[in-house]
């Protein structure tokens, strides 16, 4: 809480300085707002770049292409067999219904914990 006291007093002095120079409280609030926005501008740019990167990454996350339900003959559990495309790679996988978050459907995105095993050939 000590940092808020420091920032509050610092910003208070900036507002007081604007009022001392302009002799108009309304105009000093406008100037104070502009000063604070200019100080926050680099952080705004950084946030927008981060959001753009996240948007580009979400375009790479693809959805379920094919889906079928089967029963495991040994455990009699419901298993979803699906074909997924992620980062321009196509995966065929099977996942137990208990390990799946949500209900899968063609066109939806997949979210679940999967362990992949095998070999990738490019």
Image (tube, helix red, strand yellow):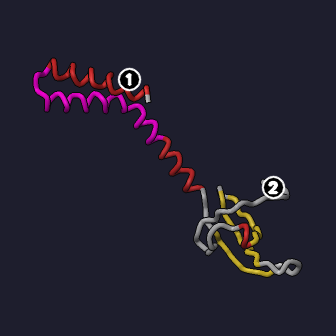
Q: In this view, does 84 lie above or below 119?
A: below
* Gap between marks 2 and 1 measured at Cα: 59 Å
Q: Main secondary structure of the magenta part?
A: helix
Picture quadrant where residue 80 is located: bottom right
What is the quadrant of residue 69 in the picture? bottom right
Other residues around mark 1 within 10 Å, as few (<14) / some (14–19) / many (≥20): few
Image-based side of 122 in relation to 9, left or right:
right
Q: Is mark 2 on a helix, strand or loop?
A: loop
- Looking at the rendered image, the quarter that the N terminus falls into is top left
Position of 121 with respect to 5 (left or right) is right
Instruction: Name the residue at 50% across, 42% down.
Output: 50
Residue 90 magenta-drawn? Answer: no
The picture quadrant where one finds residue 19 is top left
Q: In this view, does 91 lie above or below 77?
A: above
Residue beneath disc 1: 6
Residue at the extreme right of the image, as rendered: 74
Residue 121, disc: 2
Residue at position x 58%, y 71% from top?
107
- Tell me if residue 48 is in the magenta stretch: yes
Report the side of 34 relative to 87 (left or right): left
Which residue: 24% across, 28% down?
32
Q: Residues within 10 Å of mark 2 (few under 14, many from 20)?
A: few
Residue 28 appears at what percent x and percent y?
17, 27
Q: Is mark 1 on a helix, strand or loop?
A: helix
Residue range of the region highlighted in magenta in the rendering: 22-49
């Amino acid at each position: 809480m000590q940092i808020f006291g420091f920032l509050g007093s610092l910003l208070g002095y900036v507002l007081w300085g604007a009022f001392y120079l302009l002799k108009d409280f309304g105009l000093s609030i406008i100037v104070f707002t502009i000063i604070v926005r200019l100080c926050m501008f680099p952080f705004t740019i950084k946030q927008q770049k981060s959001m753009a990167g996240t948007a580009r990454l979400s375009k790479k996350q693809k959805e379920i292409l094919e889906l079928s339900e089967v029963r495991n003959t040994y455990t009699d559990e419901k298993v979803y067999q699906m074909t997924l495309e992620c980062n321009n790679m196509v995966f065929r996988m099977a996942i137990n219904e208990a390990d799946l978050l949500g209900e899968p459907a063609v066109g939806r995105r997949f979210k679940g914990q999967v362990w992949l095993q095998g070999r990738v050939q490019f």
